[in-house]
Structure formats: structure tokens, C-alpha cells
Image: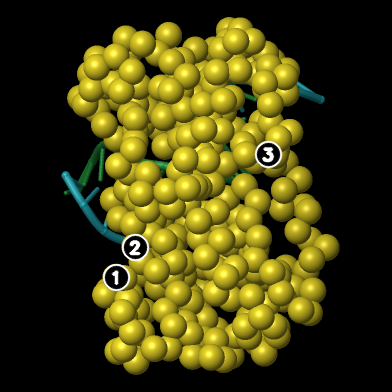
Chain colours: A yellow, B green, C cyan
Amino acid sequence: MPELPEVETLKRKLAKILIDKKISQVKILSDKSFHGDSQQILDVPMTNVWRRAKIIGFDFANQLTLVTHLKMTGQLIYVDEKIRLGGGHPSSDWIRNLPSSHTRIEYLFEDGGHLFFNDQRKFGWMKLINFNEIDQLFEHVAPDIIDDRIDTNYLKERLSRTTRPIKLAIMDNSILAGVGNIYACDSLNLAKISPTRPAKSLNFTEIERLTQAMKTIVFQAIKLGGTTFDGKYVQVDGLAGGYQDKLRVYGLEGNKCPNCQHPIEKIRLGGRGTYYCPNCQK
DNA sequence: CTTCTTGTTACTGA
DNA sequence: ATCAGTAACAAGAA
């Protein structure tokens, strides 16, 4: 599931590859995955690639932006002309065979490169909007966890107002953006705080620990290129990320807690799988 | 066959 | 009015 680190990893690579290029053709293979008139961005130079929360935006010279949310199973994979023609040394061979049955949109660039939007579950989307419509996308979205505006004082203020379990609160985009299930579980383990604690019951020191833990975990995951779990998220070149080898508790039911060696347990919180250590996470 | 999976939003109920 | 809980979305795995 792409969260902030996965989306940031994709954005950095796509910015390097795509800025200044022009799209020559858009093939929409699933109508519900694309919103807008794709003809409007043909032969227009791409000027910038950005990320905010879990959304990536591709800006074009004609004041249009292609925004995308990958939801749980979206992938963005770029294959250059050399690899497509059977040459080069692709780091993962299967990308030569795209499009696949899960490819929803295919972008052909003027230099022969191809960008594939794959999405098994079709929850993800790509949408063409005007520059002046970008702000309203984030109207109800708080700053990213890696933004300096998310600090202990801010979170103390926001969290003291709700009795919801702390894990649900830190996954709430209107409080802070970019922390999904994987990094919420791992951050709470690093901070030694139980995911079920009412948010308002955390004292200043605990919130400070949790804030630091979330930033540490998210920065580490970005550095490692994100988490590849069930093979759903992959990098732009089709390769896995690196954080799955560093996971503390997520998906590790029965394994030993990295803090205290007690077996990790799985519970259900807000209808979502939640992994934690009942011994050291208080 | 049924059940489970998930990020986000829309809806329902308190 | 505001907050909390949950169904819905889609497609595949178990």
C-alpha cells in the first residue's frame, strides 16, 4: 500500500525522468481510472512533478496538472525505449511485458518512453485539473508528517480533543497527512505506545516520543525506497523498496517485538489490521 | 461459495 | 453542530 514514503520515492524518480518531456499519446484502458480530457496534455512539455500527502501531481506548461492517487494497489512504472525494444539492462524483466491485465492507463512519450499506471483493484485514479483547482484537493488535509509544522505542540493540541484510539488519530489526514497503516503500527511500536490508547490520554512526553518516532520511521522508509508488501507497491523501475526488511511489527504477528522480544499480536482497530506488542506498548 | 483485504469518502447515528 | 463509527468502492486471495 503506497503511503507517503512510497509516493515520495516514486515522485523523486519520475521528476528526474519526465520533466521537460512531452506525451504523444494516452491510452485509457479503464474509463473509471481517468477523469478529464487526456487530449489536452498531448505535445505539452511537463514542467514539474510534485507530491503532497499521498497525491502526485504532474504539471504541464499549459497550466494543467495531472494528479493521481494510487490508493492500495496503484503502480507507476516507466520503461524507456531501449528496454522496450529488448535492449538495455532492466532491473526487473517483467516490466518489458507491460501493459498487463492490470494496466489501466498507458502514456507514450515523444522519446519512445512509456509510463504505465497499473492498479489491480481500480480504487486509484488519475485526474486532469487546472492549476487553480489544486488547493481544493487539500482543503481538508493537514500538513505532511515530515513537515516542520507537525510538531509536539501542534499534535498535543489536536490530539487532546479526541477520545479516538491514538492509531486512528495519527492516520487521520485532517490531523496529519501521510501516515498509513504500516507506518502508524511501526511508529507506535518505536514510541512504545499502545495503538488503542485514547488520543487525549497521551501526555506531552508521550506525544513528543510518538512525533519523533513517526518522523524517524517515515524518513527511514523514504531513504530505503518504501515498503514492498505482497508485491503491490514497486518503484518506478519495477524493483521492490527496502523498508520491508526493517519492519518492526507490521505484518509480523507472532514474531518477536524489536523492543522486548515479546510476541507481536494482531488486533482489529477501526476495521483495519493492527500489529503491536502488548508487553511494551503501554 | 463466503469472507477478508485496504485509503478515502460519504453517509448514518448519537 | 460536531464527532465517531461504518458501509461502500473493486478485484483477487484464501
Rendering quarter of residue A258 = top left
Mark 1 residue crowding within 10 angstroms, few (<14) / some (14–19) / many (20+): few
Rendering quarter of residue A57 = bottom right
Q: Position of residue A3 (x, y in %)?
A: 49, 46
SS category of the residue bearing label 2? loop
Disc 1 or 3, which lies upstream in sequence? Answer: 1
Where does label 3 land, which residue?
A147
Q: Is residue A27 visible?
A: no
Mark 2 residue crowding within 10 angstroms, few (<14) / some (14–19) / many (20+): some
SS category of the residue bearing label 1? loop
Tell me which chain the residue with mark 1 is part of: A
Q: Which residue is at a point 62% across and 83% down the rendered structure image?
A: A21
Q: Position of residue A194 (x, y in %)?
A: 43, 15
Disc 2 or 1, which lies upstream in sequence? Answer: 1
Where does label 1 land, which residue?
A92
Q: Indicate the amino acid at tag 3.
A: Asp
Relative vertical location of residue A46 with respect to residue A39 in this rendering, above or below: above
Disc 3 or 2, which lies upstream in sequence? Answer: 3
Between the residue at mark 2 and the residue at mark 1, the CA separation in whole angstroms equals: 6 Å
- Mark 1 and mark 3 on one chain: yes
